[in-house]
Image (tube, rainbow, N blue to C red):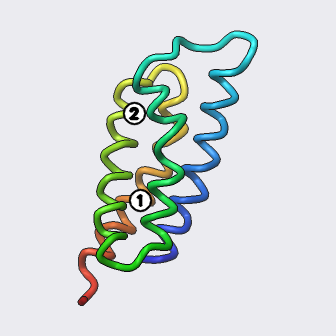
Amino acid sequence: SWRWRRAALLLAVAAQLITISALAGADPPPATRPSLLLAIAPGPLAAAAAFAPAAAARLAGVAAAVVMAVGIAGAIGHTGLFFVPALVAMVVGAVGLWREKP
């Protein structure tokens, strides 16, 4: 479970940097709420899911998955698709974390 959450962290941060670069580039996509959400939230939430104690990591994993799903749905035409691998890894890691015994 920790490996999946760590992979989700790396993928989310990479996609977040791509989104920030796209928003600050020469021909930026519109700065809508979903694209700003993807530019700000996935990295810190994935870091909390990867490194926080189990109780907090469970909540952070669910929050990160929800934020990425909402951001992907809203920014599907621009940079949202870059977050799909991070979302898959976060869901697998969060499910594994919820299945672990406390």
Q: Is residue 85 above or below residue 16?
A: below
- Disc number at residue 90? 1
Tell me if mark 1 has few (under 14), some (14-19) or many (20+) residues whose alpha carbon lies within 10 angstroms of its own.
many
Q: Residue at x 33, y 35 (%)?
A: 70
Q: Residue at x 30, y 46 (%)?
A: 66
Is label 1 in contact with label 2 (beta carbons under 8 Å)? no
Q: Position of residue 9 (x, y in %)?
A: 54, 59
Q: Position of residue 74 (x, y in %)?
A: 37, 24
Q: Considering the numbered disc 1 on the image, is that residue within a helix, a strand or a loop?
A: helix
- Residue 17 lies left or right of residue 33; in this view the side is right
Question: Could you tell me which quadrant the C terminus lies in?
Answer: bottom left
Tell me if mark 2 has few (under 14), some (14-19) or many (20+) residues whose alpha carbon lies within 10 angstroms of its own.
many
Q: Position of residue 58 (x, y in %)?
A: 30, 69
- Residue 98 lies left or right of residue 17; in this view the side is left
Q: Amino acid at mark 2?
A: Gly
Q: Considering the numbered disc 2 on the image, is that residue within a helix, a strand or a loop?
A: helix
Q: Position of residue 72 (x, y in %)?
A: 40, 33
Marks 1 and 2, how far apart in space?
14 Å
Quarter-of-image position of residue 16: top right
Judge by depth and name the residue closer to the eye, 42 or 77.
42
- Residue 102 lies left or right of residue 4; in this view the side is left
In this figure, which residue is indicated by the disc labeled 2?
Answer: 71
Q: Amino acid at mark 1?
A: Met
Question: Could you tell me which quadrant the N terminus lies in?
Answer: bottom left
Q: Residue at x 44, y 24 (%)?
A: 75
Judge by depth and name the residue closer to the eye, 85 or 59.
59
